[in-house]
Amino acid sequence: MTLKVIGAGFGRTGTESLKRALEILGLGPTHHMYEVMDSEKQRDRWSAFVNGADPDWPKLFDGFNSAVDWPSAAYWRDTVAFYPDAKVVLTHRPAEDWWSSFTGTIQQALKSGKDVGGIGSRVITERVFAGNIDDKAHVLSIYEASIASVRAEVPADRLIDLPLGVGWKPLCRGLGLSEPEIAYPKGNTKAGFRSVA
């Protein structure tokens, strides 16, 4: 099994909805932070990696056809190079909207001290945001720079730009698939957020 789709968007940009959409389209199972939270094997593998083990992408994504959300999104450059045939989906939303969602969910979970295995803290707090998840200007500059980097570095024929809320059309067009006759999934609302605890 090899990754066919790589999600390069930060958490809180519609990554759970994308996970469900990819599974509807037959491109699952899709790796997401939920899989790390729910599987001891996944936690052990990712914990070893984020604490210094060499990356073994086939092992980290064993059993998955796609990967979205953190932790994998923090390593998009590596996985895009390792899986040269995979499409890359950049989920995003306006920066202020993203900040509001992030501070009401992931930021609180990371600060709660209940991060199982420390994976969220190592990846999100340390790797992505250089140890500072409280400074709005700092965090938003990284968020916006990441979007710009994906757009600049991923070849146009591999990149699917997917703003939050646009539905099936750009995703299916980019994947060369027909649009399903059901609504695009909507999940992991701020109210229903699953903590990293």
Image: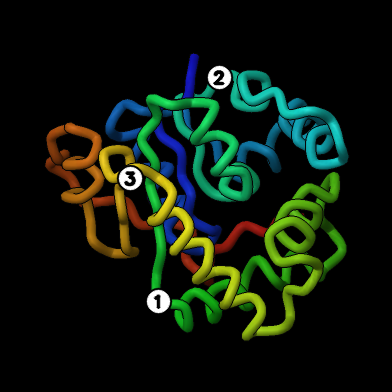
**Residue 24 in the figure: left or right of residue 71:** left
Q: How is the image coloured?
A: rainbow
Which residue is label 2 attached to?
63
62 with respect to 196 (left or right): left
Q: Nearer the viewer, residue 162 or 110?
A: 162
> Is 142 above or below relative to 46?
below
Q: Which residue is mark 3?
A: 159
Q: Residues within 10 Å of mark 2 (few under 14, many from 20)?
A: some
Q: CA distance from mark 3 to mark 1?
A: 19 Å
Identify the residue shown where x is 48% and y is 58%: 149
Residue 121 location, x and y as percent? 79, 57
- Disc 2 residue type (three-letter): Gly
Mark 2 vs mark 1: in front: 1
- Tag shown at residue 18: none
Q: Which residue is mark 1?
A: 94
Report the side of 189 relative to 155 (left or right). right
Mark positioned earlier in the residue sequence (3 or 1): 1
Residue 47 on image: x %, y %: 82, 38
Q: For the residue labelled by badge 3, is the local secondary structure a helix, a strand or a loop?
A: strand
The residue sitting at 22% across, 41% down in the picture is 174
Q: Would you call the spot at circle 1 few (<14 residues within 10 Å), some (14-19), or many (20 or more)? A: few
Label 1, secondary structure: give it.
loop
Q: Residue 176 in the image: x percent, y percent?
A: 18, 32
**Is the residue under label 1 in contact with that under label 2 (CB below 8 Å)?**
no
Look at the numbered discs 2 and 3 and tell me whether their residues touch, using CB distance below 8 Å: no
Q: Of 34 and 58, which appears nearest the observer?
A: 58
CA gap, disc 2 and disc 1: 33 Å
**Quarter containing the C terminus:** bottom right
Q: Say how many tags the image has.
A: 3
User: Which quadrant would residue 33 be assigned to in this image?
Assistant: top right
Local packing at callout 3 (Cα closer than 10 Å; few below 14, some 14-19, many 20+) is many
